[in-house]
Amino acid sequence: MAAFSRRVLWSFSHLLRQSAPLLYRSHVIRLFRGSWHRVLSMGLGAAVCAIPVGQRSEPALSNEYLIKRAAALVTDSTQTLLSQTTYALIDSLTEYTKAVYTLLSLQKKYTSLLDKMNSSEQSAVWQVMIGARVQMKKLQEEYLKYEASWARAVSLSEMAAEAAYQAGADHASVTVKNHIQLVQIQVQETRELALRAEALLAASQSEEIMKTITEDKNNPADAGSPVSSLSEDVPEAYLRED
């Protein structure tokens, strides 16, 4: 009987040892699964919390801000217009000055050879000078047109600068005013070169007219020549020495 009891106890112990690892593994798996789900849930929750939620953070656009911004945009546009008209005016003034000096050069050559040419030669040279004068007049009209456009651009820029100042866009206002001063200096320098060339041309034409009158007095027979008649048609402005 005791032997039977020992055999039963051994069998039960053996069965327990055989089944324990399975029970242990099942318990571990259940624990692992539960822990994994908890970890996964916590990880996803933390990740979601870490992602910033999009928010509309547009600044409040006040009337004052909108007016200031619009004034700054106006100053940009007027500066562009002023730059373009300044370039056109300086370019046309430069071309006009070149034409004046071309006519001046022809005038001086004509005056120096006046007593050495016959009537036909004088007429030929005078025709060349007439062509140069027509070209100069054309370029003068062109630069006067651009000068009017430039003056309007300056006026608009001044008004834009004042509007920007009143709107509180101080930087834009100062920038436009500095730009106006700069282009005015550039245009004035170019205009002075043109005025100097015109003064030299007027002096040369006055000299040529006086020499022609002297030649006509010494040679009454040539008083009705084309050269003398053309000289008489020279405007009074050419006789002034500015």
Image (tube, rainbow, N blue to C red):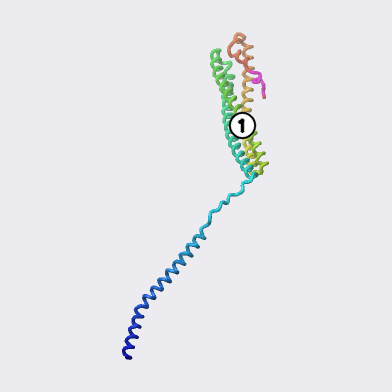
Q: Determine whether, in the image, residue 37 is placed left or right of residue 72.
A: left
Q: Is residue 238 magenta?
A: yes
Percent across and percent down for residue 136 are 58, 23
- The quadrant of the image that shows the N terminus is bottom left
Percent across and percent down for residue 92 are 57, 29
Q: Quadrant of residue 189?
A: top right
**Is residue 66 shown above or below 236?**
below
Residue closest to the far front: 1
Q: Amino acid at mark 1?
A: Trp
Query: Disc 1 marks which residue?
Result: 150
Which residues lie in the magenta part?
235-241
Residue closest to the far top: 221
**Is residue 55 shown above or below 35?**
above
- The quadrant of the image that shows the C terminus is top right
What's the residue at 47%, 64% (across, down)?
41
What's the residue at 49%, 61% (across, down)?
47
235 or 241, which is in the foreground? 235
164 or 239, which is in the foreground? 164
**Is residue 228 shown above or below 100?**
above
Percent across and percent down for residue 4 are 31, 88
Q: Quadrant of residue 225?
A: top right
What's the residue at 62%, 18% (across, down)?
208
Element type where label 1 sits in the image: helix
